[in-house]
Image: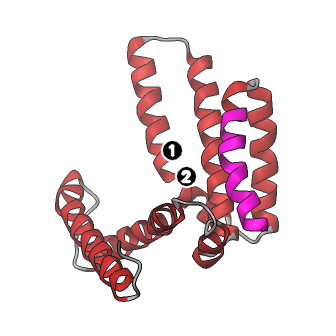
Amino acid sequence: MVTLIKILLVPAISIAVFVLPWQVALALSLVQIILSFCFHITLRDQLMYLRAILYYAVLILIVNLLTKAPLVPTLIMLLKLFCVMQTAALVFNTSTPLQIRQALKKAPFSQALTLFICFIPQVSKNWEQIKKAWFARGGKKTPRMLLVLLPVLFSVGMKQAWNTARALCARGYAK
């Protein structure tokens, strides 16, 4: 039940963050950072979950500087986006995939949603494993790394999806 409440709060908080003034997003972000430490989520782990937002923020800020657009609205939007990602990261770090699956079991679309939600951390784990293998073989962090590793990530993901589909069919979940 607690997991279901957390899952339902993510969209509600996300909408509220984008509708309410930026001070609410700032306060909520600070509360979430404190909660993350209370749940023993290290700063490194928090930054790892927000890495995509950090790349996006750098790109947006560079474009903003090149176009000489006002900086304040951009920073406010990035703060709100950071807050939304931090909310989702807290839910995924404090709930196991099994808890999420059980919480969503009563919804009519629960199976598809549960598979989708549980696949997100798996993609992240796959990326980290593929990246470690790349560096272990002497690869450098260059644009070429993305060109080589993204097809591998796609292939691994498709294989896992296929295996999951076969397992669901074997258990009688296929329609």
Q: In which quarter of the image is the N terminus?
A: bottom right
Query: Which numbered disc covers residue 50?
Result: 2
In the image, residue 104 above or below residue 102:
above
First to last magenta residue range: 1-16
Spot occupied by residue 26 in the image (x, y as percentages of width and height):
76, 36
Out of 71 and 73, give the one closest to the viewer: 73
Q: In the figure, residue 76 lies in which quadrant?
A: top right
Determine whether the residue tagged by mark 2 lies in a helix, strand or loop: loop
Along the horizontal axis of the image, is 163 left or right of 87? left
Along the horizontal axis of the image, is 71 left or right of 131? right
Check residue 64 for magenta coloring: no
Amino acid under label 2? Leu
Spot occupied by residue 50 in the image (x, y as percentages of width and height):
55, 52
Out of 41 and 119, give the one closest to the viewer: 119
Determine whether the residue tagged by mark 1 lies in a helix, strand or loop: helix
Q: Distance between the residues labelled 1 and 2?
A: 5 Å
